[in-house]
Image: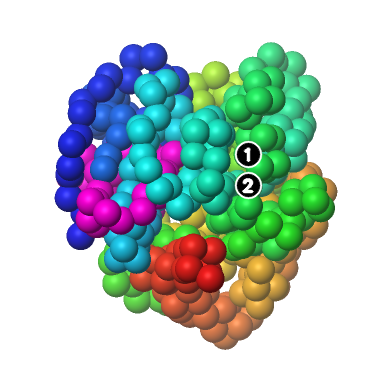
Amino acid sequence: MLYRDNIVTMGLSHLSLKTFVYDILAYFGIKEKRQKEYYVSKFSKSAPWVYISYITAPFYMKNLSSHQNLRETIAMVNVLNDLGLNVYVQEYQSRADLPSLSNVKMVFGHEPNLIKAAEKYPEALVIQYNTGAYIDHANAQIIKMTDYVNKKYHANLPYRRLIDTKDTQHSIYRGYEIADKILQIGSKFTIETMPEKYRDKIVLIHQSTQVTRDILVEDAAENEFLFLGSGGNMLKGIPLLLEYFAEHQDCVIHIVGPIEEDYQELIQNEVTSNIHFHGFMDVNSDEFTKIAVRCNYIVYPSGTEGMPGAVLCAMQYGLIPIVTPWSAFDEIKDYGYLMDYNWNVHSLEKGIDWALSLSPQERLLRKKRCSKFVIDNYNLDKFSEEFRVFCKSILFT
């Protein structure tokens, strides 16, 4: 088990407060964004070290229910301790000095501190931890999707969530280049977004889900659909959903998750009575469950991700996925509908037409299979075991 050793409290005033984890913490009512910058978990004084450039917030939080990556971070450290390794976790954007460690076997995580650690501990294996599509693909999609909205509404919304690639020395480009292996959350579709020269380095790992409650999967309303997402929802396909459902008011869409204020202002006159915005909801709450059980399908026309947890959460509730390749898992065609590679309303319409063509018997069978598939394959135990096998294969062979 983890324990704290030689922990020093350091402010994060010099760090970007727009990083993913702090957005999460702020959104879930944790007003204090400044977390301690590192966490140390020792197996023994003589054991080798692993340096992790990732997030430290999970080790100082009482509630880990807000996102699966919080629990997965703790699980990774526990696995490394069980393998007889000391672990030093540091915020991936921290500007504090890296620790003086001897016998570092592996550096793991995100840039820029992954790059700095690779330079400081040159004998260590370098493992990039990747949780999304390749940066060039993601940036191109963000530009395409934002331009789509700006053209439609004669607006000038900024490009949100673009990945900065200017600092080539310490950017993610450099991480791909120097990595011995890339541990990737995603699917074969995520790998397709990567340059071929990096694909042999990639090892996929099954993430876990946030859903902790028991769910009775039953058939629901034939024409009700769910979208579930966190921040950046404009970039996850909501423009296509609004366009389709405004024209097909015999179908209902429930949109769960926050919407950017400037985008919401643009669309306020476009929202028809069959489009319901619910804002943020805890996926384990009674309120969310009441909405989820009304729907048979999760529709997620995102262009930028790598197997989003929102799709898995909805599937665990028994919803059938209608997704783009970039938000799909390898076995998607056995469980739901795979949209084509064209990010447009026509592709979405074909997916919804397919959904509405299913018989009640086929629909219920798929719903139950979807729930079981996620429960069996996307849980914290499986994530931990796959991480253990991965670490043993590169550190002890």
> Mark 1, residues whose alpha carbon is within 10 Å: few (<14), some, or many (≥20)?
many
Report the amino acid beneath label 1: Gly
Q: Residue 174 falls in which quadrant of the image?
A: top right
Report the amino acid beneath label 2: Ala
Left or right of 215, for residue 198: right
Over which residues does the magenta segment extend?
A: 41-68
- Coordinates of residue 54 in the picture (x, y in percent): 43, 40
Indicate the secondary structure of the residue bearing disc 1: helix
- Magenta-drawn stretch contains 97: no
- Coordinates of residue 204 in the picture (x, y in percent): 59, 63
In front here: 231 or 180? 180
> Mark 2, residues whose alpha carbon is within 10 Å: few (<14), some, or many (≥20)?
many
**Is residue 1 visible in the rendered structure shown here?**
yes
Mark 1–mark 2 Cα distance, whole angstroms, equals 6 Å
Name the residue: 69% across, 20% down. Answer: 166
Left or right of 115, for residue 392: left
Name the residue: 49% across, 33% down. Answer: 120
Left or right of 280, for residue 348: right
Residue beneath disc 2: 179
Image marks 1 and 2: residues in contact by CB distance under 8 Å: yes
- Coordinates of residue 361 in the picture (x, y in percent): 57, 85
- Magenta-drawn stretch contains 66: yes
Name the residue: 30% across, 34% down. Answer: 38
> In the rendering, which numbered label is found on residue 175?
1
